[in-house]
Image: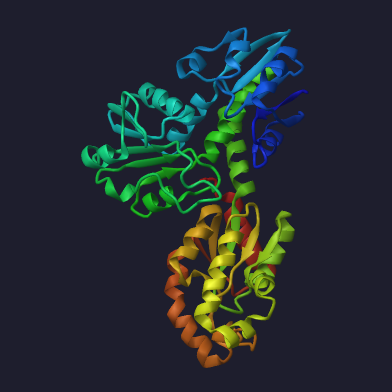
Amino acid sequence: MECGLIGEHLPHSFSPEIHKLIGDYTYELRELTPEEVGPFLEKRDFRAINVTIPYKQTVMPYLDEISKEALTIGAVNTVVNRGGKLYGYNTDFGGMTALIESAGITVKDKKVLILGSGGTAHTAQAVCAELGAKQVLTVSRHPAEGQISYEQALDAHTDAQVLVNTTPCGMFPHPETMAIDPLLFSQLEGVVDAVYNPLRTRLTQRAAQQGVRVKNGLFMLAFQAVLAAEHFFDTPISAARAKEICSAVWRSKENIVLTGMPASGKSTVGKRLAAMLDRPFVDLDEEIVKDAGCAITEIFQNEGEAAFRDRESRVLKQVAMRTGCVIATGGGAVLREENVQYLRQNGRLYFLDRPLDMLCPTDDRPTASDREALRRRYEERYDIYCRCCDKRISADGTVEEVANAVKGDFCDDYSGD
């Protein structure tokens, strides 16, 4: 084994894709039972490995040397075999530091609440202390000595200026959950979430709507992988290259979501974009037809619009959890706020703004089957499309022109927010 990742359950790991972007080396996933970890390390048949839960402490007794950062945190996530001796490091510290700093969040002299009490929480505590936080409090459902409960946090610490979530709340397959409501903190300036699947959790979405600086965990995952690769090969990676890698990881996972009126070209442009970027294309209306086993017009006729919207929301929720896709939505998909939140989890939303006089009513669009119905829908929905999109794209040009406009914006967006 050259390089890889060991853990107990690794079916959804992004690590191989990230390391493929970092360099030309073999990176494998190796699932181990607790009983297999010791023999694996004793055999020392690898060049370098990353370690994930639940083995970040398990590996430590088998190592010959452990870095100061790893000892401080009490966990190792990177092991390098140098001539038969095993050296342990913790790159989560650098990843968490980069995550906070990349969000533009200032921790110095601030009150910080760390949500959760596991290994990542210990890392966050160490990082916030290093960055000069005035007070760092750990919040736990079952507080031990030196920790506080969520009830205590809401009773006495709603003046906290920074929240760092290290719990699995908001993680796939339960993206609706939040460890705590950020709107209850009157002086909140920043929210950092270690969760990276989905790319944007409900916690950070809710905070961002109030103008709070936010950042989710994919940047941390990518940056700690860069730091691990430096240890793997004893070769530094420049800050510019590290940022480039983190941006590439984000773009590879983020969906391109097309919204807009019926007949605005979402499906046609979406297919062209998917071909340009070598991405899967998903047509939400087609997914609804598959789910119902009949045409959309039949759903409207047999069940009514309300039932169709319920089905649309259910199907959309599943589609929105995919990553790296081009998604064409139905004209009314953004009418429900919950749908917009689901699409935002992993997607950047584009409104294809095609002028009303260029839209054509057709029989297969029940809410816009004639010119008058189309006009009413346009007037009802235009402000909603504008409000919920990340970028409005003029769609009065050719398919190629519109697709290139979306592609240009998406490929130039390095925010990762």
Q: Residue at x 59, y 86 (%)?
A: 302
Name, please, the residue furthest toward the front.
35
From what the image shows, is residue 297 above or below residue 406? Answer: below
Q: Position of residue 388 (x, y in %)?
A: 45, 64
Residue occupying image coordinates x 53% and y 34%: 220
* Front position in the image: 290 or 342: 290
Q: Is residue 332 visible?
A: no
Answer left or right for 183 relative to 49.
Answer: left
* Residue 260 can be seen in this image: yes
At which x and y percent is residue 104? Answer: 40, 38
Relative vertical location of residue 51 with respect to residue 162 in this rendering, above or below: above
Give the residue drawn at x 47%, y 59%.
Answer: 341
In the image, residue 60 sits, relative to residue 176, either above or below, namely: above
Camera-side residue of 8 and 16: 8
* Residue found 59% across the figure and 44% down from its top: 250
Q: Quadrant of the N terminus?
A: top right
Q: Quadrant of residue 131?
A: top left
